[in-house]
């Protein structure tokens, strides 16, 4: 009986060692699928840095698997731990993603507001600008520029409606910069004739 | 005792069988490398930069993994990874080639995008100069403004190396620039019409010939070149840069259109103390202008209540400000013109006399910008 127990323990011990010799292929597949899912959900746009880290972690886990595969006594325990933690991180990112997208949306709307303010400021200044000798030509040209900027402003809402919050933010930023440039040019034109900064 | 020995033997046999089943040939290490390579390609943007090759790579990877699974399912003694190793090595080689290709593509894409943005900006700058020159502040200016916004967006993306979206913005900028060029061509289209140029050239030649044969002073205004030339006895005496009406390049049709008229006129009054320094009043509208006005009114081409206008002068006050259709000069230049002219001095105003003009050459370049 004692001998039987010894043998059973021996077999069990060896089996335990050898069980660790199997690659965690299912865990690898599940983790990769989870990363693909979160990418499709918009992580590449709205959580780019976090997604890069997750992919780097996956590469590290796969490298660990590859390293163990070359050995006679393979131990995939570390790789499994890495993959399990990674899967948890991916799930956490997936849970946090809606909030990040909402934040991007709010940031885009904020920039839209700032672009509108900049356009209104340019418009008001142009309306007040003297159009006598020396300024009429410049002021008229800048009015034409403002029409272009105002037309592009409309694209911001289209992008927001299409849920392209990064695109909307980029357009808003560029419109705001253009409107600010127009304002500066109007001031320069006025200064040219009045000799005073307004 | 006997039972114990049998059990021990069975355990040992079982162990040997199990051990041998696990003591298989090692799975090809290339398989793990291929997996990692797939990740690298994904991160490098292979689906954007090398879509076709990447799709094939993924397909080959999938096939390889399926074959590996099948091989792994076999009992240890019957497994052989030899052909699979060759296959995976080939996939690794192709994957690495794709990575190298993507690196090259990214570098060349960065250069190409920057070059394209720079070329588009140069076109915007040239067109803006033309709008300054021609006092254009309508569709050309609007489209240029939109193009500048797109280029600003593109530059931000180039800095961030987000080349997937850059091309969209560069294409949009190019479209706006094209529209601006088309508007500019439309504005100046009649300056390239052979018949119109001939007509203007004839007026200019007749005026100079008259000056020569009569031994008198004549004034020729070239709107496109923004130049007023005084001729004496058919030879150039002096030339001056001028300003025009807000829509000076158009031929004046009615009061308030802010265009500068074209035709053969003469000085009918010299005004010493004009609001614009000195001034020479010309006989706009002449007979031809009256005929054209009547026809345009009949055809409904001008506002119903519009009159034909008048009080077109050559005056001082500066060449840079926009007139309401008059020809403007710097005061010091106007002093000379005023002194040279008499009542009756011919004043001929033409659009252009030569198609070789620099501005028109620029317009012709638009056709090549497709």
Image (cartoon, helix red, strand yellow):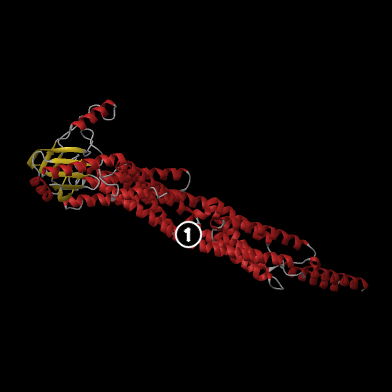
Q: Residue furthest front?
A: B213
Residue underneath mark 1: B109
Left/right placement of residue B10 relative to residue B74 reads right
Q: Residue furthest left?
A: B272
**Residue B266 occupies which quadrant of the picture?**
top left
> In percent of the image, x 67 and y 70: which residue is there?
A68
Give x and y (percent) for residue B257. 23, 36
> In percent of the image, x 33 and y 48: which residue is there?
B363
**Label 1 SS:** helix
Q: Is residue B131 visible?
A: yes
- Neighbor class of circle 1 (other Cα within 10 Å; few <14, some 14-19, many 20+) is some
From the viewer's side, name the closer residue of B114 and B1. B114
Give x and y (percent) for residue B71. 75, 62
Q: Is residue A29 above or below residue A137?
A: below
Left/right placement of residue B290 relative to residue B144 reads left
From the viewer's side, name the closer residue of B83 and A17. B83
Which quarter of the image is occupied by the N terminus of chain B?
A: bottom right
Q: Residue furthest right?
A: B2
Q: Is residue A179 visible?
A: no
Give x and y (percent) for residue A66. 65, 68
Q: Is residue B120 above or below residue B184?
A: below
From the viewer's side, name the closer residue of A179 and B140. B140
């Amino acid at each position: 009986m004692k001998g039987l127990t010894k043998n059973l323990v021996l077999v069990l011990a060896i089996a335990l060692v050898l069980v660790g010799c199997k690659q965690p292929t299912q865990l690898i597949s599940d983790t990769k699928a989870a990363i693909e899912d979160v990418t499709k959900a918009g992580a590449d746009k709205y959580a780019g840095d976090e997604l890069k880290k997750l992919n780097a972690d996956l590469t590290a886990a796969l490298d660990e698997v590859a390293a163990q595969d070359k050995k006679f006594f393979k131990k995939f325990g570390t790789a499994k731990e890495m993959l399990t933690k990674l899967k948890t991180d991916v799930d956490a990112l997936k849970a946090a993603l809606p909030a990040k997208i909402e934040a991007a949306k709010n940031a885009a709307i904020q920039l839209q507001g700032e672009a509108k303010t900049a356009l209104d400021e340019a418009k008001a200044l142009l309306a007040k600008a003297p159009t006598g000798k020396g300024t009429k030509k410049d002021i008229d040209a800048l009015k034409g520029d403002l029409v272009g900027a105002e037309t592009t402003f409309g694209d911001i809402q289209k992008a927001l409606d299409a849920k392209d919050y990064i695109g909307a933010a980029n357009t808003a930023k560029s419109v705001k910069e253009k409107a600010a440039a127009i304002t500066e040019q109007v001031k320069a034109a006025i200064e040219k004739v009045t000799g005073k900064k307004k | 005792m006997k039972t114990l020995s049998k059990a021990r033997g069975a355990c040992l046999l079982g162990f040997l069988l199990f051990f041998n089943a696990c003591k298989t040939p090692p799975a090809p290490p290339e398989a793990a490398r291929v997996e990692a390579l797939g990740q690298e390609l994904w991160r490098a943007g292979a689906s954007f930069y090398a879509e076709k090759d990447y799709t094939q790579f993924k397909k080959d990877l999938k096939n390889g993994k399926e074959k590996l699974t099948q091989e792994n399912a076999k009992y240890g003694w019957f497994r052989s990874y030899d052909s699979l190793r060759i296959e995976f090595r080939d996939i690794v080689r192709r994957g690495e080639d794709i990575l190298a290709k993507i690196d090259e593509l990214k570098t060349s894409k960065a250069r190409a995008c920057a070059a394209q943005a720079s070329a588009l900006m140069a076109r915007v700058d040239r067109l803006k100069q033309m709008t300054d020159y021609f006092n254009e502040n309508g569709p050309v200016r609007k489209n240029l403004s939109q193009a500048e916004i797109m280029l600003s967006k593109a530059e931000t993306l180039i800095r961030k190396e987000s080349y997937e979206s850059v091309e969209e913005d560069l294409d949009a900028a190019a479209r706006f620039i094209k529209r601006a060029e088309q508007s500019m061509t439309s504005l100046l289209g009649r300056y390239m019409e052979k018949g119109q140029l001939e007509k203007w050239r004839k007026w200019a030649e007749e005026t100079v010939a008259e000056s020569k044969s009569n031994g008198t002073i004549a004034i020729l205004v070239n709107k496109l070149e923004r130049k007023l030339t005084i001729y004496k006895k058919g030879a150039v005496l002096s030339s001056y840069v001028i300003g025009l009406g807000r829509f000076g390049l158009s031929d004046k049709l009615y009061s308030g259109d802010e265009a500068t008229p074209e035709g053969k006129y003469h000085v009918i009054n010299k005004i010493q103390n004009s609001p614009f320094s000195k001034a020479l009043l010309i006989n706009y509208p002449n007979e031809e202008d009256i005929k054209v006005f009547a026809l345009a009114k009949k055809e409904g081409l001008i506002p119903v209540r519009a009159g034909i206008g008048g009080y077109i002068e050559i005056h001082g006050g500066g060449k840079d400000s926009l007139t309401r259709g008059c020809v403007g000069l710097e005061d010091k230049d106007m002093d000379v013109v005023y002194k040279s002219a008499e009542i009756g001095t011919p004043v001929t105003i033409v659009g252009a006399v030569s198609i070789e003009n620099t501005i028109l050459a620029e317009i012709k370049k638009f056709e090549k910008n497709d």
